[in-house]
Image (cartoon, rainbow, N blue to C red):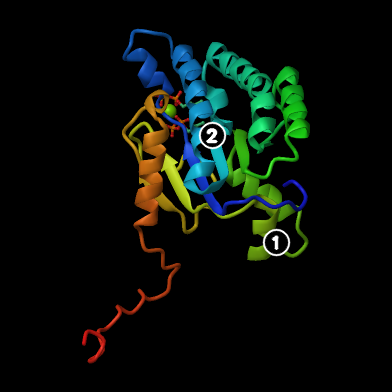
Amino acid sequence: MPSDFTIQSTLHAGIIMDGNGRWAVARGRPRTAGHRAGAETVTRVVEAAPDLGIGVLTLFAFSSDNWRRSPEEVGSLMALMAEYMERETARSVENGVRVQAIGRRDRLDPGLREAIARTEAATAGGTRLWLRLAVDYSGRDAILRAARSLLDPSRESVEAALGPPVDLLIRTGGERRLSDFLLWECAYAELVFSRRMWPDFDAADLAGAVREFRGRERRFGAAPPEPVRAVAGWLD
Ligand code: IPE
Ligand code: IPE
Ligand code: MG
């Protein structure tokens, strides 16, 4: 995790960006075309997030289980992520977006690894949005790594090693599962599932998910709050 810094808003949203492949196949195009369109959605969503009160945005870009896909698809995803980093760095600096990758780096293409390092360094001063891109990421592996790095693991120290708890978890593409994303951090996350395929997801969809989140009552295991009771005389 980066050393101490302050982000202006507090809401942490995580997004499982799913449905690129189905979006492309439905249009008679290769799955990689869906990933390219999905990268444009990332730009839109990152732009819209801060005005919705999102201070931390964690996007699931490539899971550690996604290595099981064809070499062509994996290669195109690696290239697209490097391209995204290069293309968005200047805009991120301008918009106060601090970009960080989470997940394993040792198995990434060297070109992507270098692009990540450059973007992280260039955007380190951003305080409007902390954008975390989960690449070669596994929630179970992240918990294991955190636990192994600590002499006496506690809830607090594991949380500090992993990152902030997720408030709102969105998954596009219609599936209703976590697929090994932010397992610890989602302990009390509000879950919002969208049937929209990721390339079609837009700022209005993100605003709708945040609205739904704001309308939910979070209790963290406590009893629901007492309703306000009218007291004789209040309405006189
Ligand atoms: C999400 O879209 C992107 C990644 C997992 C890398 P998918 O590629 O999983 O799209 P579907 O689920 O097959 O439609
Ligand atoms: C989860 O989507 C991973 C990302 C969005 C990067 P998958 O498409 O890989 O998940 P499953 O296989 O449907 O569970
Ligand atoms: Mg999928």
Is disc 2 surrounded by few (<14), some (14 to 19) or many (20+) residues within 10 Å?
Answer: some
Seen from the viewer's position, the closer of residues 141 and 214 is 214
**Residue tagged 2:** 46
What amino acid is labelled 2 in the image? Val
Residue 217 picture quarter: bottom left
Residue 144 falls left or right of residue 29: right
Distance from Cα at disc 2 to Cα at disc 1? 29 Å
- Please report the residue visible at 64 percent of the width from the left and 51 percent of the height from the top: 163
Asked if marks 2 and 1 touch (Cβ < 8 Å), the reply is no
Residue 209 falls left or right of residue 188: left
Residue 184 can be seen, yes or no = no
**Residue tagged 1:** 157
Is disc 1 surrounded by few (<14), some (14 to 19) or many (20+) residues within 10 Å?
Answer: some
User: For the residue with label 1, is its CB less than 8 Å from the closest atom of ligand 2?
Assistant: no
- Please report the residue visible at 36 percent of the width from the left and 19 percent of the height from the top: 23
- Vertical placement of 194 versus 142: above or below? above
Seen from the viewer's position, the closer of residues 233 and 81 is 233
What amino acid is labelled 1 in the image? Ser
Residue 92 falls left or right of residue 193: right
Seen from the viewer's position, the closer of residues 145 and 127 is 127
